[in-house]
Amino acid sequence: MVFHQGSIRLGDVICYEIGFDGLVRSEVSAGANLLAVQSNDATFEVDGQSGESTQQVAMARIQAITSDRAIVYSSTTGESAIIAPDGAVLARTGMWQRAVLDRPVPLRTDLTLADRLAGWPEAVLTALAILALGWAIALAMVRARRGGAPGPT
């Protein structure tokens, strides 16, 4: 669901959903010109680990680049960040740090090639890999029936 406030069309992604291209793409396709991610990584950070939070901010940076959208990433316990459409981190907090981040970001509306093509490149490459595997298995079976070793003699 995209929320409208003035010129802002805010697409909302929750926590680890930032790692799923289709969920982010659905917000962008619905008209989002800014993406927001809210997260609570306390379960993972209770013993001092920061990997989960760092990983999610990194995934948000990739999604910013892929969708050409700024992302505001807010965590109750982990890192929070404002990320530019090119993936640059404009502002960031530390772990377990209360802060207010304030940076201007562009509101973009164009769809990137990745958004327009969606999952098609992955589907085509997967199909080609399956066909190649099937061809290799069939070729190995033919050679095994002939009793010959692979390669020239």
Image (spheres, rainbow, N blue to C red):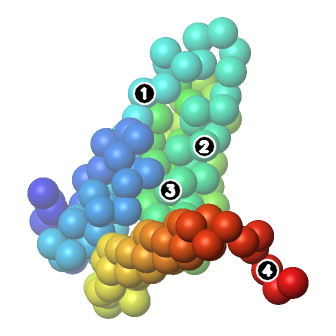
Residue bearing the label numbered 4? 151
Q: Is residue 110 visible?
A: yes
Residue at 37%, 54% in the rendered image: 20
Q: Label 1, label 2: how many angstroms apart (C-alpha)?
A: 13 Å
Q: Position of residue 26 (x, y in %)?
A: 22, 66
Given this view, does label 2 or label 4 mark the residue nearer the observer?
Answer: 4
Q: Label 2, label 3: how many angstroms apart (C-alpha)?
A: 9 Å
Q: Label 4, label 3: how many angstroms apart (C-alpha)?
A: 48 Å
Going by the numbered disc 4, the residue's amino acid type is: Gly
Q: Quadrant of residue 150?
A: bottom right
Q: Position of residue 147 (x, y in %)?
A: 67, 67
User: Quick one: label 2 or label 4, which is nearer the N terminus?
Assistant: 2
Residue bearing the label numbered 2? 55
- Give the side of residue 24 with respect to residue 96, left or right: left
The front one of 108 and 46 is: 46
Going by the numbered disc 3, the residue's amino acid type is: Ala
Residue at 67%, 28% in the rendered image: 50
Specify the label residue 40 is tagged with.
1
